[in-house]
Image (cartoon, helix red, strand yellow):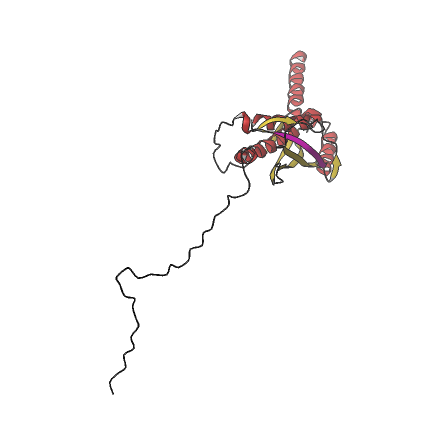
Amino acid sequence: MAAYKTGWIMLGLFTMATLGCGRWIDVMPPPPSDAASVARTVSKDERVPLVVEGFHVVQNGAPQHPSSDLERRLLTSVQETRLFSTVIPLGGDSSSLSEKTVTARMTLEETIDPRSGASAWKGFLVGASMFLLAPLIELDYGYAAQATLELERWDGDVRRYEAASSGTARYHLFGATPILFDELKGQVTETCLQDLMRQLIRDGERYLAGYSSSPPAIRTVTVGARKSTPRPGENPAVPIAINPAP
């Protein structure tokens, strides 16, 4: 009988521990595309290099040093568009490139909301209940990102692309791990990059070597009135004044 009770107790503890480690992530989906992607073949002669000239990260209003993983994500996303002949990372050597190049500047504004007040109150309740409420009390951690990609053509033409996304990591007390928060940031960042690349592909023709941003010149022709000349054998018309009879 004692062994039977012990088994049920162990099963209950295992169930509580398992539920207490539960976690999941909710990420806002990207906005629907306003136009279907058009597949096009770009010749190698039309592609120009892209040089990353700036990369800035701001976290809750404070400047941060961009991570190598974040820069790698950006470079990989741009390369997968197949719009550029090569992609030079930040600080790379671009002296041997042709005159026609596209420069890129990336800014990522992060907003982290750990919900410290609510987490502290819920943590107190879990501790007061001797962790019995751990499987029932849900904690959360918010993260939002706004990405801006600015591309400048070799002729000075500049275009900006913006994308934003947010997500929430929901977890129980024993499910709070750094990996969970990294997964949340990674999914939100990837959503922003996908939206940026969709916008970039839509304007892909602007960054080809043969594209001209200036409208074609309009030729104007001035046409003057032609004076009529009498034909041979014809007398020119002479105006005649007719006075009424008295």
Q: How far from the left and from the top, in percent, is residue 57?
A: 71, 35
Q: Using the image, determine if residue 190 lies above or below residue 239.
A: above
Q: Quadrant of the C terminus?
A: bottom left
Q: Is residue 15 visible?
A: yes
Is 162 left, or right, of 245 in this rendering?
right
Q: Is residue 53 magenta?
A: yes
Q: Which residues are magenta?
A: 49-58
Q: Is residue 171 magenta?
A: no
Snapshot quadrant of residue 172: top right
Residue in the foreground of this view, choosing between 167 and 235 = 235
Q: Main secondary structure of the magenta part?
A: strand
Q: How far from the left and from the top, in percent, is residue 72?
A: 66, 25
Q: Is residue 177 visible?
A: no
Residue in the foreground of this view, choosing between 209 and 173 = 209
Residue appearing at x 54%, y 29% in the figure: 46
Residue appearing at x 70%, y 36% in the figure: 112
